[in-house]
Image (cartoon, rainbow, N blue to C red):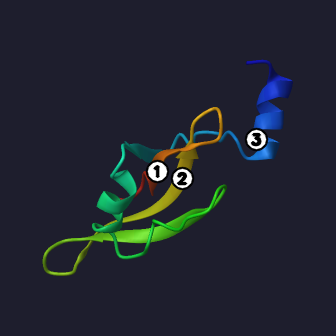
Amino acid sequence: MPVSEGVRALEAGTAFAPLPDHRSVAVTGGDAVSWLNDLVTNRVDDIGPNELRRTLFLDRTGRVRADVHVGTTTDRDGTPAGLLILQDGVQP
C-alpha cells in the first residue's frame, strides 16, 4: 500500500497502526460480540466505529485477570467483522 493511501485510511478511520508493545486478539464470527459481551465487565455490543472501550476479564472469584481495550473491526467494504482486543504488554 502506498504511504499516502495508508495515511488517508488512518485519517478516515478505516485502518490502524499496530502497537508493538501490545497484545492483540481478533474475535470474529456471527456470535463474537455476544460471546465476548458475556465474558467482560463492560458492554462491548454497542462500541461505535473508531472507538475503544476499556473492560476487564475476571476470574470466578472476581479478581481481575486482564485489563484490556476492545474496539470494532470492519471488512474493506465497511461491514462489521468482529472485535479487536488489545492488552498492554506490561500486564501478565
Few, some or many C-alpha atoms within 10 Å of disc 1 (few <14, some 14-19, many ≥20)? many
Residue kind at label 3, given as amino acid type: Leu
* Label annotation for residue 91: none
Label 2, on which residue? 72
Residue at 35% in and 76% down: 41
Label 3, on which residue? 10
Task: Give the side of residue 27 with respect to residue 53, left or right.
Answer: left
Q: How many marks?
A: 3
Marks 1 and 3, Cα distance to the nearest angstrom?
18 Å
Give the vertical position of 62 relative to 75 (above or below): below
Sequence-first disc among 1 and 2: 2
Q: Quadrant of residue 33?
A: bottom left
What element does badge 2 sit on? strand
Q: Horizontal and vertical percent for residue 90?
A: 41, 56
Marks 2 and 3, Cα distance to the nearest angstrom?
15 Å
Residue kind at label 1, given as amino acid type: Leu
Q: Horizontal and vertical percent for residue 26?
A: 41, 43
Residue kind at label 2, given as amino acid type: Thr
Give the vertical position of 50 relative to 73 (above or below): below
What element does badge 3 sit on? helix
